[in-house]
Amino acid sequence: MDYFKIAKINDFKDKHIKSFSIFGKKIGIIQHKDKKFSGIEVSCKHQGADLTAGKIEGTIATCHRHQWKYDLDTGKCLTNDSPDLRKYDVQVRGEDIYISFLPQE
Ligand code: FES
């Protein structure tokens, strides 16, 4: 699987989730309480709003546009019948964070 550099660990000093635009998609990198990182699509499945712009409580993100809710751990939409958010493998190499080109199966 191919990876590319997306961020640095220092980018997460004041935030635990940040979104990045990659090939027209919004991908969120999350730093968990155990300091590990994960990657997940953060474009709302309704109309594509950036889920990191809305309220995030624990692992639950609420879209700021029409309040669809998602669990960012599982990618499941909690309020509507919707496809899951795609998850991406993330690797830390030194101070840099890399993400896979392709989502997990
Ligand atoms: S765009 Fe997210 S709920 Fe409508």
Image (spheres, grey):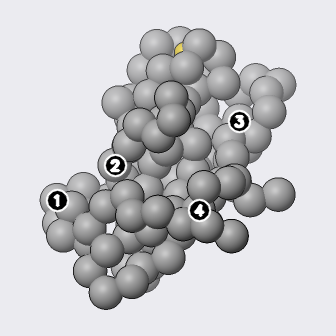
* Dot placed on the residue nearer the N-terminal end, 1 or 4: 1
State yes or no: discs 3 and 4 in contact (Cβ < 8 Å). Answer: no
Q: Amino acid at mark 2?
A: Lys
Helix, strand or loop under label 1: loop
Task: Tell which of 53 and 40 is nearer to you.
Answer: 40
* Dot placed on the residue nearer the N-terminal end, 3 or 4: 3
Say the numbered circle drawn on residue 18: 2
Label 1: few (<14), some (14–19) or many (≥20) C-alpha neighbours in 10 Å? few
Instruction: Inspect this view and state whether residue 32 appears.
Output: no
Q: Residue at x 68, y 41 (%)?
A: 85
Label 4: few (<14), some (14–19) or many (≥20) C-alpha neighbours in 10 Å? some
Task: Tell which of 102 and 18 is nearer to you.
Answer: 102
Q: Residue at x 69, y 53 (%)?
A: 103
Q: Residue at x 18, y 70 (%)?
A: 10
Q: Quadrant of the C terminus?
A: bottom right
- What residue is disc 1 on? 14
- What residue is disc 3 on? 77
Q: Quadrant of the N terminus?
A: bottom right
